Amino acid sequence: MISVVVPAHNEAAVLDRCLDRLTGPGVQVIVVPNGCTDDTAGIAHRRGDVGVIELGEGSKTAALNAGDRVATGFPRIYVDGDVELSPGAVHRIADALRRTGAQVAVPRRELDLAGRPLAVRAYFAIHDRLPAMRDGLYGRGVIALSAAGRSRFDEFPAVMADDLFLDSLFGADERVVVDDAASVVATPRRTADLLRRLRRVRSGNASLRASSGATRSSDRWSWLRDVVLPRPWLAPAAVVYVALTMIAAYQATRSPGTTWERDESSRAGAHRS
């Protein structure tokens, strides 16, 4: 039995789409609506093919831990409620863990950039080519752990950067990227929403790094060394990438209270593929 835990905070617009690619024979799916003010919990309850644990508190950490406490199977897959996996991805990811003996697995990442403004597309033209995005466990919204991998820690700590936390626990020889499974990640539809997302990620990562010396350090020159120098035609996109990164860093410093800002635009107008 494969167990899938889905923390979901106000994901009514996209939850059905996400769950359609998770449910099936041999898969236990547990949805944990947390702090929701929309119909996320109602959608999950009406399906009948998932377990539901409702939390009044809006906390992804609390949702992950609540789902973990009732999940019974392995591999254990954690899936953000706003991503969409490719057909059959759950079983492909589980099979890759069993076949390779890896402790943790992630699907490859596909970005939905349709209709996005030039600045958003330019940012991700650089960001998606960073080596850290190829082998890191973050930025996909999906992470799978073997039973041995899950035993590396007790509960998820109270941090925003849960994916960076998991990334810090496993070496390069303990992880696998499953190329025949994809996680489709919706990108922000507006530049302002991208900045909102960048501020939140930056704040969460900085907080985790301050409390744990074992996390992957930020390589601030990777965009130039690993992306632009080998591909000089991306220089104009790099200008946008650096500018947005610097603006988000400045705003995060000036407004430390906006640590849980969320990009709602990527959820707006969601549709089934």
Image (cartoon, grey):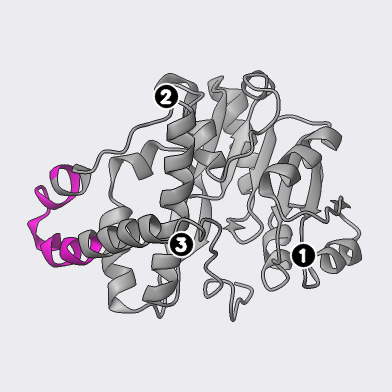
Front in this rendered view, residue 123 or 56: 56
The tag earlier along the polypeptide, 1 or 3, is 1
Q: Can the viewer see residue 24 in this picture?
A: no
- Residue tagged 2: 213
Q: Callout 3, which amino acid?
A: Arg
* CA distance separating discs 1 and 3: 20 Å
Membership of 221 in magenta stretch = no
Q: Secondary structure at mark 2?
A: loop
Above-or-below relation of 204 to 173: below
Residue named by callout 1: 36
Mark 2 burial class by Cα count in 10 Å: few <14, some 14-19, many 20+: few
Q: Which residues are magenta?
A: 225-241
Q: Position of residue 174 (x, y in %)?
A: 48, 21
Report x, y in % for residue 142: 58, 46
Q: Residues within 10 Å of mark 3 (few under 14, many from 20)?
A: many
Residue type pointed to by label 1: Cys
Disc 2/disc 1 C-alpha distance (Å): 34 Å
